[in-house]
Amino acid sequence: MFHTPDNYHNISMRLSEVLDDIGVNENMVVKIRRAILLKETMHSIKNKAADRRITVYILGSQSESTTTIGLQSDADTLYSLDNNIVIQDWSEWTAGKKNFLMIQNETTTPGYCLLQSLRCDVPLPVTHETGNFYAKDTSGRILFKNTIIDASLLRGEKRQGPSGARNTPGFLASDIVAAFPCKSWPPSSRAWQETNTWPTAEMKRYAKSSKCFVVGVGSTASENAAFEWRLSTSLAERCLMFNLNITQIRCYILMKMILKTYINVENLDNGSRISSFMCKTVLFHCIASKPSYIWKECNILKCLNFCIFTMNNCILNEHCPHFIVHENNLMVRKFSAEVKQQLLERISNLIPFDGISLFGIQIDDLGKRLQIKLNMINEVHHDIPQPDEYTMMTTADLLHRIASISISKNHYDYELLHRKKDQSLEMKLKILLRTVLRFTRYYRAGSMLDKTACRLLAPMCCTSTGSLIASQNIQINRTVSPQALAWLDAGQDSDVASSRLKLASIMYCTGDMEKTACILSHIEKQFNTTVTETVCGCYNFHQQYSKRGFGQLCCQYDEAEFKFIVALCVRFFPAEINCVPHELQYEMFRSTQEDLQHRDILDDWMDWAVVDSLPYLYFLQYKTYGNLQKPEEQQQALNKLVWVIRTELNLAWVIRTELNLAWVIRTGLNLAHTETALNLLGQCMEQENRPVDALQCYRVSLRHRERNNAAKIHICRCLANTIS
C-alpha cells in the first residue's frame, strides 16, 4: 500500500520504548486489568449482599488498560439491572422478572430494537400501561421508551447517549449506563461468529457465552429515536480487547492520541467527533484483515499507517460497520458535509504516516520523549517524568480506587444503619449477620476474584456488627460484651487503622483508658506516615497528591493487599452514637434546616460522625492521656494533631503541568474530612483554655466547608462559654 521508508524500523522500536516508559507494557496491562476486574467484582458482590439485583461491569479504556495518564479517558460503568430481562421469543419468558420482548423489523435501525412490555406473572403482553415512559404502537403493543433514562439522572449528571455523564473538576469524567440483560444473543449479532478470520474460534465461543445488553438510546438516523434501544455487545468487545497483543494495544492508544491532537480539534461538537469506539472498531477490522505476524514492535508505525488509512476510508464513505453487529453503521448521518470535509482534510495531512506527526503530540510528553530516543533533542533540557514515576502514579491510583470501594457509600451498612432509622436494633443485626453469611457463601462457591472480594469486604461488616452491639452495651451498662469484642476482633484487618480506631473509641467510651492507650500505641506503630495513604468513600474526595512511598509499595504489592498501606476514614452511624466521644458526636448534627437545602442526594454521610484516621488517632491519644494524668504524653499527642492539620493546610507539591498531575516527595497527608479534624483540634484548644486558638480552628474549618459544618455550633458554644 505504501512504500516503507528505511527509518520505519528505527522509529517503531524507539516509539515502542516510549510507550513502555509511560506504562503501556505487558506488566502494567495485566496489573490494571486484574485490579479493575477486582473492583468490578467487589461492586457486584456488595450489591448481591444487600439484595440489590444489579451486576456491575467496568468497561472501556479503564478496564482494557488502553489509556494513559495523559489521555484521561472516561470511566465507563455499566449497571446490569438483573430484575429485568429482554427475550427473543416467548419460550424465554421468565416468571418473577420484568420481561421485555425484543422487536426488530423493517422500521428499526440495524443494531437497535424496540421493547414490548410483558407481564411478569404470565407470558402475556401488557395491554394497559400508564405513565410517560410507555406508548402504544399501531399494532397495539405497549412499548417501553428510552426516555426513562432522563428521569433517572442524579443531580450533576447529564444525558449523553445511553449514559448519565458526570464531570466533576479534579476527577476523570464518568459515564454510568443502566442496561437490561438479554436472555440470548439477538440474530443480528450472531453473523460475526460465522467468519473464518480473526477472532479465533475460542474467542468467539467465549464471547458468545457472555451477556448481551440493550441500553437506552435510539439511532440518530431514526424517526422514532425515543422508542429505540441499542444492542450492546460490550462484554464480547472486552473479550476481544483482552486478547490483543501489546503492539495492537499501543496502536489503539496512538490512534486516540492522534485524534485528540490533530483531528478532534476546533469547531467540532461532541456529536461530530471521531469517537474512541470508532477507533477501536477500525482497529478490529484492521486486525481481522491483516496477518497476525505484522503486529509486532518493529512494525508499529506501518500498522498505525494502515489504521489511519482505514479510518480515512470510513470517513470518506461514511461507513464504519460495527465489528459484531455488521448492519450497524457507526457513521450513518454522523457528519454534515462541511464537517466531513474538515475531517478528511485533517486526516489526509497524516497520510502516509511517516512518524513526524508524533513529535507534535504533547500527551504524556510523547513527542518530546520520542525525539529524545531518536537523539534529536537533549533530555537534560526537558522536565519529563521518569518511567518509574508513571508506574508509581498509575498503580497508586489503582489501589486507591479499589480501597475506596470497601468504604463507599453504597455499602450495606449505609443502608442498614442510616436509611432505616425506624428499624429495630435486632432487625439491623439480623440483616448484618445475614450479610456475613452471604459473604461466606460467595467465598466458598465463587471464583478467585469472588474470594478476594469477600476477604476485603467482610471485615467492614464485622466491625459494623461489633460496633452496633457495643453501642447498645454501653447504653445499658457501660461495658462491652464478649460477643461485640469477637465481632470487632474479626474486623481488625480491614486496613491499617480505621477498625482498630473504632475499637479504641469504644474502649474510651467505656472508661477503660489503659486499654485505649494500648490500642492507640499499637495503631501508631503500624501507621507509617511516609507510606500510608488516606482513603475516603463518603464523597468525591479529590486526592491532591500521592506519597512516593505509597506508590513504590503499590508497584510491589498485589492489588488485593491495599489494606496494608491505606487508612480508611473512621465512620460512626447514628445507631453507634454511644461509641463516639462527645466531641465527635457534634458531627452527627452538623446540618441546620437551611443547610439541608444545600445538600446533594449523595450527602447523607453528613448525618454520620466521620473523621480521617490519623487526626482521630492523635485526638484520642490527647483525651486518653489527659484522663490518665499523663500531661507530657498528652501534649505530645496535641502537637502531633497540630502537625497533621498544619501539614494538610500548608501543602507544597511539584506540579507536572504538562500532565496535569501532582507528585510530591514528603510525609504529608491528604485529609478528606479536614473540617472535622479542625473541629476536634478546636475543642482540644478549648480544653487547653485557649479560646482564641479554638475560634481560629473553627473559622478555618468553615473556610473548608461553609455549610453543613458543626463548626457553627462550636463557635456559638465557645463564645457563650467565654462570655460567661
Image: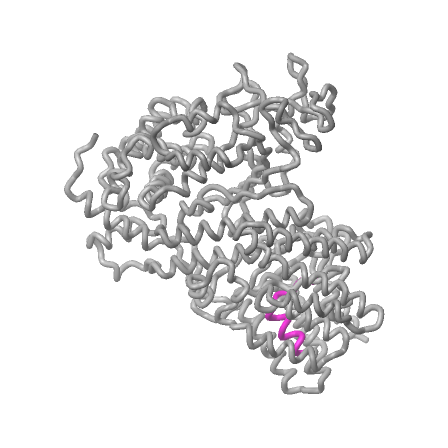
Which stretch is magenta? 609-622
**Above or below, comparing residue 622 to residue 467 in the picture:** below
Q: Identify the main secondary structure in magenta.
A: helix
| The C terminus - image quarter | bottom right
Specify whether 407 is left or right of 277. Answer: right
**Above or below, comparing residue 573 to residue 615 in the picture:** above
Kindly give the residue lying farthest to the front in the view shown.
445
Where, by quadrant of the figure, is residue 522 drawn?
Answer: bottom right
Residue 719 visible from this viewpoint:
no
Which one is in front, 208 or 363? 208
Kindly give the residue lying farthest to the right in the view shown.
476
Is residue 525 found inside the magenta-colored segment of the image? no
| The N terminus - image quarter | top left
Q: How far from the left and from the top, in percent, is residue 408?
A: 62, 54
Q: How far from the left and from the top, in percent, is residue 481?
A: 77, 70
Q: How far from the left and from the top, in percent, is residue 14?
A: 24, 50
Specify whether 73 is left or right of 635. Answer: left
